[in-house]
Image (spheres, grey):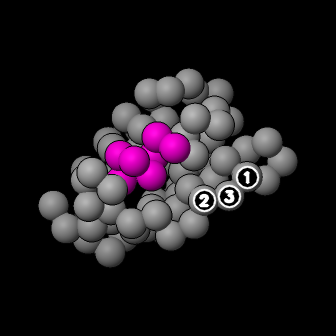
Amino acid sequence: MIELDARRLMCPMPVIKAQNAIKTMTSGDKLRVTCSDPGVMQDIPAWSRINGHTILKAEEIDHEYIITIEVGDD
């Protein structure tokens, strides 16, 4: 699993950073994104659906938002 620290970034930067990371990955790989912007809880799942990726887990822990994405087929 690849870890992406997107804390202190405001939308749309966490989505853009996740998109750039996923471009280097293959189908079935997993990316865990940690953010401080609560908007990612809607933005990353929406972006993932549009691009064929699966959200495995989305949770808030101590005011941080952690989303685990499984990379889909391109």
- Helix, strand or loop under label 1: strand
Q: CA distance from mark 3 to mark 2?
A: 4 Å
For the point 57% across and 46% down, the residue is 41
Residue carrying label 3: 59
For residue 54, side relative to residue 65 (left or right): left
Chain part drawn in magenta: 42-48
- The reply to whether discs 3 and 2 touch (Cβ–Cβ < 8 Å) is yes
Residue carrying label 2: 58
List the single residue furthest toward the bottom.
28
- The reply to whether discs 3 and 1 touch (Cβ–Cβ < 8 Å) is yes
For the point 42% across and 38% down, the residue is 15
- The question of residue 72 being in magenta is answered with no
Residue 12: image quadrant is top left
The x and y percentages for residue 71 are: 33, 65
Q: Nearer the viewer, residue 37 or 2?
A: 37
Residue carrying label 1: 60
